[in-house]
Image (cartoon, rainbow, N blue to C red):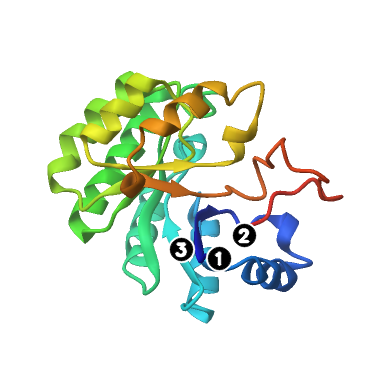
Amino acid sequence: MHLIDIGANLTHESFENDFEQVVADAKSAQLRHIIITGTDLATSKAAQKIAAKQPEFFSSTVGFHPHVAKSVSSIDLSAAKLLSCADHVAAIGETGLDFNRNFSAKEDQLRIFEHHLELAVELQKPVFLHQRDAHDEFFPLLKKYRPNLVGGVVHCFTDTARALHDYLELDMYIGITGWICDERRGQELQRAVGKVPEDRLLIETDSPYLLPRSLHPKPKSRRNEP
């Protein structure tokens, strides 16, 4: 079986010292391709640089995570647009709304999210989406742009059955992470995943985050890997 990890944060500092070994291990595990997630301008540039060196194995995304929305300048947005046109950039994002911790004001998150949607429409690239505790604001905006979007994935889906229904109605892909292995928080997701059509279901590690709790023995680093 050949697998694709559609969301890995391989620009994270925890991979600095053993990146090549992590990649080798991923290939040994029959991983065929990895999409490296960009969460701000720096990580988007770094991800694209990796993808350009090994395009047969890596793609990347370009975007600003909602946590950093408050600090995104017009210069950043212009630079991100230019970078998004580069080879091997597979999607626009990570982008969306996160009202769980509100590291950025809602107004800033909404503004930057809509900018990403507009860019994705302009460039005709799919969107890589983040939504947490924000479905009521997130969904109408996504629905507004959906007719002109080529597609996208709701990354690391952990929401309700209602939200899942809404995203599937928009013909979006659903990204599932190791959250589903969490016996404390993943039970609702375990019940919901059976409702996702096979042709809409994607898998991702979100590494180095979301190490599956059911994994034994756990790595000494406590780091999730592709």
Alpha-carbon neighbours of circle 3 within 10 Å: few (<14), some, or many (≥20)?
A: many
Q: Does 99 sit above or below residue 29?
A: above
Place of residue 143 in the rendered image (x, y in percent of width and height, measured from the top left): 20, 33
**Marks 2/3: CA–CA distance:** 11 Å
Residue drawn at x 65%, y 29% is 182
The first of marks 3 and 1 along the sequence is 1
Give the number of the disc on residue 184.
none
Indicate left or right for 9 with 193 as reference.
right
Place of residue 174 in the rendered image (x, y in percent of width and height, measured from the top left): 38, 41
Give the number of the disc on residue 60.
3
Residue drawn at x 61%, y 22% is 185
Q: Is residue 95 visible in this depiction of the protein? A: yes
Q: Residue furthest right?
A: 220
SS under mark 3: strand
Q: Disc 3 marks which amino acid?
A: Ser
Residue contact at pointers 1 and 2, CB within 8 angstroms: yes
SS under mark 1: helix
Residue contact at pointers 3 and 1, CB within 8 angstroms: no
- 64 or 225: nearer the viewer: 225
**Marks 3/1: CA–CA distance:** 9 Å
Kindly identify which residue carries mark 1. Answer: 46
Q: How many marks?
A: 3
Place of residue 210 in the rendered image (x, y in percent of width and height, measured from the top left): 65, 40
The first of marks 2 and 3 along the sequence is 2
Which of the two marks, 3 or 1, is nearer to us in this view? 3
- 75 or 112: nearer the viewer: 112
